[in-house]
Amino acid sequence: PYYPSQAFPGSNQGPFNPSQSNQGPYYPSQAFPGSNQGPFNPSQSNQGPYYPSQAFPGSNQGPFNPSQSNQGPYYPSQAFPGSNQGPFNPSQSNQGPYYPSQAFPGSNQGPFNPSQSNQGPYYPSQAFPGSNQGPFNPSQSNQGPYYPSQAFPGSNQGPFNPSQSNQGPYYPSQAFPGSNQGPYNPSQSNQGPYNPSQSNQGPYNPSQSNQGPYNPSQAFPGSTQGAFNPS
């Protein structure tokens, strides 16, 4: 049966002929856009079902073939944007489940692999912004639970580790703004509770003999006198 709509647009090929040996059913929507390849032929050995939406955009790779040994299910959204890497293959030994949102933005690192020994669960929000540090690994001995909000802004200090001997609970709001002092540690002998509103004073320590309760509102307005000390 011949229907002109089945001829190749812009070509000199004759009408569709299902009796030719190198042709299976032909539908123009299955031809590669902008290429010279003939019609889709599901009976050719190097082809599985072909759907143009599965071809690599902007590449010369042939149709998706789930029967090729180096391919698992392929979905373009899983290819690395702007890279030449082939489709995602969960059967390759160096890959676990891959989701692009877990790749390091702006880096060449391969997909997230939870089966690699140097990786625990990885979430990009836990990587240090603007650094080259690998993913968060709670199984590394120098790391406790890590939350970026606890890292010192603008510093190179590693993640918060409550198991290190020189640290107690750490909250960034307690660090001295604009200083290099480490995190607040209530277990250190020279510190009591620290309040950032006492800006140029060291941590307030009610156990020191030269201090009583301190209230900034008791300082002389317009003077350089320190805090009020009733003792």
Image (spheres, helix red, strand yellow):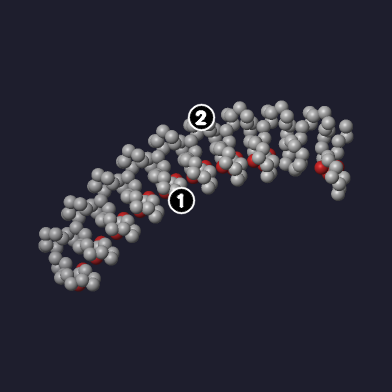
Q: SS at mark 2? A: loop
Q: In which quarter of the image is residue 200?
A: top right
Q: Disc 2 residue type?
A: Ser
Give the quadrant of the N terminus. Answer: bottom left
Q: Which residue is drawn at 17% across and 59% down?
A: 24
Please indicate whether residue 184 sits to the left or right of residue 113 in the image: right
Q: Considering only vertical position in the picture, is 189 above or below 126?
A: above
Image side of residue 224 versus residue 131, left or right = right
Query: Callout 1: 10 Å neighbours few (<14), some, many (20+)?
Result: few
Answer with mark 1 or mark 2, whichever residue precedes in sequence. Answer: 1
Between residue 68 and residue 200, name the one nearer to us: 200
In the rendered image, residue 40, in percent from the top left (x then y), is placed at 21, 59
- Percent from the top left, x then y, of residue 54? 31, 55
Q: Which residue is drawn at 53% across and 46% down?
A: 129
Q: How crowded is mark 2: few (under 14 residues within 10 Å), some or many (20 or more)?
A: few
Residue 91 quadrant = top left
What whole-number distance in Å separates the C-alpha atoms at marks 1 and 2? Answer: 28 Å
Quarter placement of the C terminus: top right
**Residue 196 is drawn in which quadrant?**
top right
> What x and y, as percent, mark residue 190?
73, 29
Q: Which mark is residue 106?
A: 1
**Residue drawn 63% across and 31% down?**
167
Q: Which residue is drawn at 40% across and 40% down?
A: 113
Where does residue 84 sit, x and y in percent of width and height? 34, 52
Asked whether the beta carbons under mark 1 and mark 2 sit within 8 Å of each other, the answer is no
Q: What residue type is labelled 1?
A: Gly
Q: Using residue 21 as the reference point, say whether residue 196 is left or right of it.
A: right
**Mark 2 lies on residue:** 141
